[in-house]
Amino acid sequence: MARGGQTRMPLLEVRDLHLDYQAGDRVVHAVDGVSFTIARRGEALGIVGESGSGKSSLANALIRLLPKNAIRYDGAILLDGRDLMALSDEAFRREIRWRRMAMVFQGAMNVLNPVLKIGDQIAEPMLLDERLNKRQARAKVESLLERVGLGREFYGRYPHELSGGQKQRVVIATALALDPDLLILDEPTSALDVSVQAQIMNLLKDLKADPGISMIFITHDIGLASDLCDEIAVAYAGEFVETGPADRILVAPRHPYTALLLASLPRLHGDRPPSPMPGEPPDPTHLPEGCRFHPRCPWRFAPCLRHPPEIPVEGGGFARCWLNDPAVAGDRFGAPLLVAAATP
Ligand SMILES: Nc1ncnc2c1ncn2[C@@H]1O[C@H](COP(=O)(O)OP(=O)(O)O)[C@@H](O)[C@H]1O
Ligand code: SF4
Ligand SMILES: [Mg+2]
């Protein structure tokens, strides 16, 4: 916030980002006007939503790795105030990707090169970067292997000798090779069993604390996101439908979709089983008119046939739901959404 009368520059500011794909004669609005900020170093933003909500597309848009059928890519992406959209692809590749923003791709642990030693795979981006010679790169890889909890003796091993959790540590080490400020992790634990998942989450918490890497952590599991992240953004059909501090979202969700995601979590205590999310995600080429969640929403009412804007909510962030606009919601305004079984 304000320091010495000046506002500190956010690390990352994204405004009205769009990414559309051509799919036959139709268009998929995979990222449809998304805005968010990562205010400071060491902050983690969790992006949560069901499969198909546009999470990977958003990650790819941030790091500018777009499929050939991308037909619209615009908006503002400011890193330390610098407009990344103004950079040529060459400048982006040279200065930003891997160096400032790195990514752990969805499923990356399954595509490690089977004939390349682990250490050589991690060294690859360093050698391409050409700032380190081979000996320096080796020393750095060994220290990264230690940092991700594997130990330098893993340098000469091959992927088939590693467990799933160890492979994911290798992928994380590779992403850290050029000391990025921001790490984007796309479902980094979804293929791992629960105990290994917890170990990887602990590693991410460590990296967040020291050296203070900022993270965008993508997951379909809102419980997992709230464990690591300061802020949460809930994605639905290409939009963010709710954002805010994780603490607020967990106890006072202001969008029905968020409330239903929370209600679908398994519980340790309580006398009700988790409630499954009703309905199915919409066809991305035929999105519902008005609120995109309305066909599935137990709280829907007449105004929901109009598309809700981002409405600021108490406790921070916004919800794209008419229940938060007193002039529209009337008696329904402010009704708690976090009901035991998440039904109105
Ligand atoms: N290259 C592509 N061409 C056309 N549609 C795509 C492409 N990639 C993803 N999609 C569609 O875009 C939407 C968002 O996909 P994605 O970003 O992968 O979501 P998520 O990561 O949340 O599962 C989905 O409907 C998906 O089918
Ligand atoms: S705007 Fe209406 S349909 Fe959409 S989430 Fe809110 S109550 Fe439900
Ligand atoms: Mg995905």
Image (spheres, grey):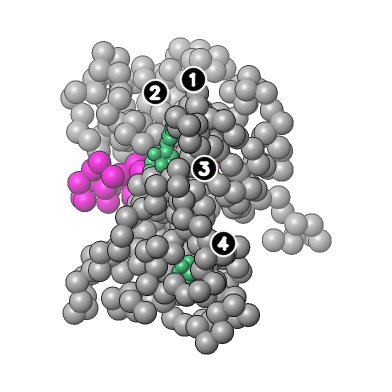
Please name the residue that numbered disc 3 is placed on.
Answer: 29
Q: Are marks 3 and 2 in contact (CB under 8 Å)?
A: no
Q: Are marks 2 and 1 in contact (CB under 8 Å)?
A: yes
Which secondary structure lies at badge 1? Answer: helix
Q: Which dot marks residue 126?
A: 1
Q: Is mark 2 within 8 Å of ligand 3?
A: no
Using the numbered discs, state the Cα–Cα distance from disc 1 to disc 4 in whole angstroms. Answer: 47 Å
Q: Are marks 1 and 4 in contact (CB under 8 Å)?
A: no
Amino acid of disc 2: Ile
Q: Nearer the viewer, mark 3 or mark 1?
A: 3
Residue pushed farthest front? 25
Viewer-proximal residue among 182 and 53: 53
Which secondary structure lies at badge 2? Answer: helix
Amino acid of disc 1: Met
Please name the residue that numbered disc 2 is placed on.
Answer: 122
Amino acid of disc 4: His
Amino acid of disc 3: His
The boundaries of the magenta stretch are 182-207
The percent coordinates of residue 281 (x first, y second) are: 36, 53
Q: Quadrant of the C terminus?
A: bottom left
Residue 7 visible in the snapshot: yes
Q: Is mark 3 within 8 Å of ligand 1?
A: no
Name the residue rendered at 45%, 43% in the picture: 285
The percent coordinates of residue 57 (x first, y second) are: 47, 39
Using the numbered discs, state the Cα–Cα distance from disc 3 to disc 1 in whole angstroms. Answer: 35 Å
Q: Is mark 4 within 8 Å of ligand 2?
A: no
Q: Answer with mark 3 or mark 1, whichever residue precedes in sequence.
A: 3
Q: Nearer the viewer, mark 1 or mark 4?
A: 4
Which secondary structure lies at badge 4? Answer: loop
